[in-house]
Image (tube, grey):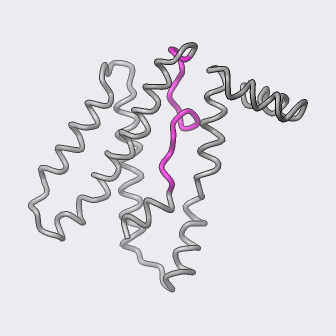
Amino acid sequence: QMQRLAMELHDFDPALGQEIISKYPAFRVVQIAEFNKKVQRDIKVVKELYIKRNGDDEDAVWDKYDEFKAEYDRLVQQSLKGSRQRPTSFLVQETKRVVRKDQGWWSSTQQHLPQVLAGIFAWWSVDWFEDLRKQDGNAYLKADPDTLRQPNSGQVVCILR
């Protein structure tokens, strides 16, 4: 509903609409959705670009991305359960647990990279969301994909490559 109202404000007067949206915390969800829309690319598009640039479709990269995405989603969901008092601390502990498994060998490090990266990006998303909740008017903001900053799938693929 807030997105629809924001669109109406933009249509009525683009400058005034943008000022209202940027000033009032209730419109923060709209700003997040716009941010996600700007930085996100569908994974299919990323895959096409990857193949165009690299000439082949490396299954290993996409397996790592799938592992990253599943772990990221799991961590975000678990950290934002209503019973968690300190979600960012939970994410740090989960990521440290994965890092402790690393034996220091390059292959071991590569094997754990999707999980560690998921922990880092989950922390980034949740920490930002928790800061947003602390602002005036946002205490009851619900966590869903539209209200969380999302990692850029293209950047994640480049790191995992």
In the image: residue 64, left or right of residue 138? left
State the image coordinates of residue 105 (x, y, percent, origin top left).
Answer: 12, 68
Height in image: 7 above or below 133? Answer: below
Height in image: 72 above or below 14? Answer: below
Can you say which quadrant of the picture contains the C terminus? bottom left
The residue lying toward the viewer, choosing from 148 and 70, is 148
The residue sitting at the bottom extreme is 55
Dividing the picture into quarters, in which one does residue 46 lie? bottom right
**Magenta span main SS:** loop
In the image: residue 124, left or right of residue 115? right
In the image: residue 118, left or right of residue 131? left
State the image coordinates of residue 82 (x, y, percent, origin top left).
Answer: 39, 19
State the image coordinates of residue 84 (x, y, percent, origin top left).
Answer: 32, 22
Q: Is 113 part of what is drawn in magenta?
A: no
The residue lying toward the viewer, choosing from 160 and 82, is 160
In the image: residue 23, left or right of residue 17? left
Residue at 48% from the left image edge and 21% from the top image edge: 133
The residue sitting at the right extreme is 12
Height in image: 139 above or below 114? Answer: above
Q: Which residues are magenta?
A: 138-152
Residue at 62% from the left image edge and 29% from the top image edge: 29
Dividing the picture into quarters, in which one does residue 63 lie? bottom left
Can you say which quadrant of the picture contains the N terminus? top right
State the image coordinates of residue 62 (x, y, percent, origin top left).
Answer: 42, 67
Q: Is 142 part of what is drawn in magenta?
A: yes
Height in image: 5 above or below 11? Answer: above
The residue sitting at the left extreme is 103
**Number of numbered discs:** 0
Residue at 10% from the left image edge and 63% from the top image edge: 104
